[in-house]
Amino acid sequence: MRFVWAVVAFVLATLLIGAGIAQRTIFMGPAAQQVELSVEDSTPFVLVDGAVLRANPGQQTLLVRGDGDLFAAYGRTADMQAWLSDATYTAIDLDTDGEPTSTVVEPAVQPEEGEPAEGETEQTGRNPAGSDLWLDSFSESDQLITDMQLPEGMSILIAKDGTEPAPSDIMVSWPVDRSTPLVGPLITAGGIVLLVGLVLYVLAIRHQRRGRGPRRKGPGPLPVTEPIDLSVEPAPVREALEEPKDADAASGSDSEAAADAKEKRTERRALKGRRLLVLPALGLAGLMFAGCSSDSWPQFDAATPTPTPTQTVITPENQKPPAVTQAQASRILQSISATIEQADADRDIDLAGTRLSGMALDARSTDYTLRGTLADREPPAAIPTEAIEVLLPQATDEWPRTVLVLSKSKSDDTIAPTILTMTQADPWSNYMVTNIAEMQASTEIPQLAPAWLGTSLITENAAAFLTLAPDELATAFADVVDSGEKSEYYGSFDPVALSLADSIVQSRNAVTQALADGGAAETSQAAFDVAPSDDPAVAMATLDSGAIVAVSLVDQEKITPKTSDAVIRFGENPEAKALTGAEEASNGVVTTYGLQLFFSVPSQGSTEQVRLLAVHQDILNVEVIK
């Protein structure tokens, strides 16, 4: 009976282990689910709605095949539709049955005649590569494969160069859950049953051996006897009778010993064979257990919720999305820094104009002129991009959009932190730096909204909630420079701002003193004036109902002769000579400096003062008075 149970255990173990292995082999389904997106009509762009990529759970893999360079980018659906609003494109969305369907969308707006959109001409379309609007982009040749996980409200744009038809061989795939939680238990149970069967088999062998007992050889046949005289037994006859008996006894004794030895050898072979059988079985079970990964076992703690920290900032109702994300801002800043650094090296003002505007661009233009003449003049410092310490994007879905960035260098402590504002005028334009200044590392930044939330750009209507309106801030500081303690705004600014105003006054006094020391005080005179520039102020709200305001001022220094016979000689002023191309001026000369300032303005009713955060000064121009 033990043999029967051992055979049953072996069969059951084979079934269990075979069932477990079959789940990981012949019963294993495909690794991914694929859907091909059909494009019926050829257009330069294909916009795949994020709902198509979220039709199945899991990470989405996009596969695009075609000839030549391929381009794909993802971003907010509304932003991409705005970028494509003046172009014909193919939109792929889900129909009522949940199946992908393509539709050709005609332009909703037309660029003004004679003024094509940014990067577009009458002969060629608009290349989507390099746009700051994308959250991320990818470029490959002939075949493009990328993994993503687009949340709701996102879409993906597929194109070549904006002129050629977009690739039509597009496929989206999702991973299929191939976990087999029964494989581990089945193989484990099979291994246990296999061991039980082996034990039963060994016990059955031992029981059979012990039940049969030792086998001994019986005595041989007796010889035929004759009547004899019992009283007299001849010796020869007795010897003849005894010899066969002794031989039979000896023969029987030898047979018993041989049988016992043979039985012991047989038992040793059987035990050795059973050991050799058990070891491979245990090794096979061990290998099967080792090959079972975590997805081959039931995951009882998979549904255990993980606690998450509660947000300290509550998102307001109808909150618009931030203009940029952290990763997007980092990519944009790196592009801006690289472009400006290349423009500075080549003194290419047109290239600089693709990333700078306003006073920041005017200062670069003057610097390029000076460095073209003055070989020992140092180029402007590069914008650090290693770490974005502060990112404050405007929360809006319209244009223009503004972002405030504070970046630092991790590898070089001598590079001052740089704070700047950059603005995107429309969906087709890249971000342009409008204000930029250096900040002391010890300067304290006011409490700002997180980057994922964004903030609002303060307009004239909201300016009443600040101690100084943004469009009045530059005028107020200029009045402090000109009037000093007599200014009505003198008490509104902190000591750092007042120190800057005092340094400007001291530089003016130094010019006047230089004229007196040179003996020109009787023949020439100096006049100074500081006023807001034409660049509008940029104000972004902080969490304490205040604002960070960026303004720019123009500080002019005018030196004119007192008599018609006097002339203004530039002497040891190489900058004036380089910018004017002259050695002297009979009617006088005007030197213009630009000041870019960042202030922290408190809310109305606060007892805090307006704090100066950062400042940058450049020479903008030296002009001979005609």
Image: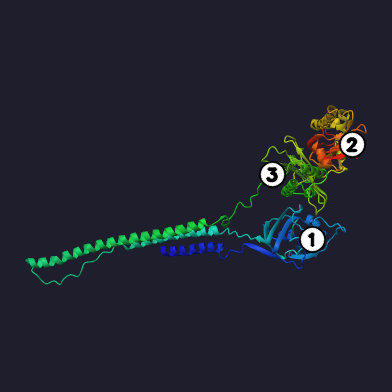
Amino acid at the residue labelled 2: Ser
Kindly identify the amino acid type of the residue bearing the numbered disc 3: Glu
> What is the secondary structure assignment of the residue under circle 3?
loop
Residue contact at pointers 2 and 3, CB within 8 angstroms = no
> Mark 1 or 3, which is nearer the eye?
1
Given residues 301 and 402, the one toward you in this image is 402
Residue highlighted by disc 2:
586
Location of residue 349 with respect to 488 vertically, above or below? below
Q: Nearer the viewer, residue 231 or 361?
A: 361
Amino acid type at mark 1: Gly
Element at badge 2?
Answer: loop
For the point 72% across and 59% down, the residue is: 71
Residue at label 1?
125
Residues under numbered marks 1 and 2 in contact, where contact means CB atoms less than 8 Å apart: no
Q: Can you tell which quarter of the image residue 446 is in?
A: top right
- Secondary structure under the numbered disc 1 in the rendered image: loop
The numbered disc on residue 386 is 3
Residue 384 occupies quadrant: top right
